[in-house]
Image: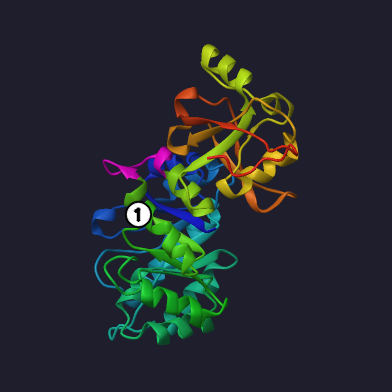
Amino acid sequence: MAIVEICAEGIASALAAVEGGADRVELCENLADGGVTPSVGAITTLCRASGGTPIHVLIRPRGGDFAYRDFEVEAMRIDLEAARSAGASGVVLGVLTTEGRVDVPATRGLIEAARPMSITFHKAFDATPDPFEALEDLIALGVDRVLTSGQAATARAGLPILAELVRRSAGRVAIMAGGSIREAEIEGLVGAGLAEIHAGSAAALDGTTDAGLVRRLVAVARSGSAEIYHLTTRDEWDRAKAEGAYRAASLDAEGFIHASTVGQLVGSANRFFRGRSGIVVLAIDVARVRVPIRWESSSHSENPFPHLYGPLDPEAVRSVNALESDQAGEFRWPV
């Protein structure tokens, strides 16, 4: 299971990332030039509308290299203080020397000015000549995470170095994989130990973040699949199709519809439906769900369960599978 951060250009894309259930949003502007600091107005507006989703702000005064002059570092300090005042929970920055190494004095000063916000050192890291030396410098400085593609064009190509960075960091700093990450690659990155995933283009349609694509990425990062599952009776499902919307009893009683990942499904079936007949499994395409999906903890599993905060559109259901129990009334893997 991995945290999903969505890089969003502008308020509209950032709010789509929030709607799609991103764990965190990085707000920036002018991605065509690699991204620069957004306006204070944009930061403030997003933080007010984000509903508690952490907003991290890119602090980068210009495109180009990452060797900044003193007046540019001062501008970064002022920008990060403005981001904190606007309600941001973190900042994303990176300063290198003219030789390409981590500029320790400048970075230390920015970190001190930014606290208590969370600090991400961005992909300036991938321009350093020795990633393992840079890693130790950043750990000593106390950054919270490093965004990197493993010094390759894509995270997929940089996976060997990403895995080694995870090993060497030994939990002292989070390594966040970024760099043209696609849905199909997330499982491999998580399997290599990457606990945080940074995505941008994979969550966008025509250059704008799409909430449905964000939902898919989050679901894959949580469970390895872009589907989630709901247990109900055949009669209830047939009635929902006729009415055009599915409402479980829990929607009125608890405010959401319970769902499961593939790994949680059988346990849920035996916990709530043991010995019953006429049970079906709804396989739900998260990209088609038009209500919020929140992944929330439960005493029943070490991993969070997906919950749908609103009625389920039958068009979001990919397949309906009968769930049969054995002679003892116990369910097993049904599909």
Q: Is residue 258 left or right of residue 154?
A: right
Relative side of 19 to 213, left or right: right
- In the image, taking residue 27 as reference, residue 51 lies left or right, namely right
Circle 1 SS class:
loop
Residue name at image x 55 percent, y 77 percent: 142
Q: Is residue 208 magenta?
A: yes
Q: Is residue 37 left or right of residue 215?
A: left
**Residue found farthest to the front:** 327
For the residue carrying disc 1, how many other residues have a C-alpha within 10 Å: few (<14), some (14-19), or many (20+)? some
Q: State the residue at coordinates (50%, 47%).
A: 219
Residue drawn at (42%, 63%) of the image: 188
Q: Is residue 68 visible?
A: no
Q: Name the spot of residue 319 as percent of width and height, x first.
A: 47, 31
- Say which residue appears at 54% left-offset and 70% top-offset: 144
Between 193 and 204, which is closer to the camera in this rendering?
A: 193
Q: Is residue 48 visible?
A: yes
Tell me: residue 11, above or below residue 141. above
What residue is shown with label 1?
182
Q: Residue furthest top?
A: 242
Residue 71 within the segment the image draws in magenta:
no
Amino acid type for the residue under numbered disc 1? Arg
Q: How many numbered circles are shown?
A: 1
- Residues shaded magenta: 204-213
Q: Position of residue 162 (x, y in %)?
A: 41, 73
Q: Position of residue 240 (x, y in %)?
A: 57, 17
Give whichever of 165, 156 is nearer the camera: 156
Quadrant into which the N terminus falls: bottom right
Asked if 104 appears above or below 272 in the picture, the reply is: below
x, y (%) of residue 301? Answer: 69, 52
Q: Above or below — where is 303 with respect to 283? A: below
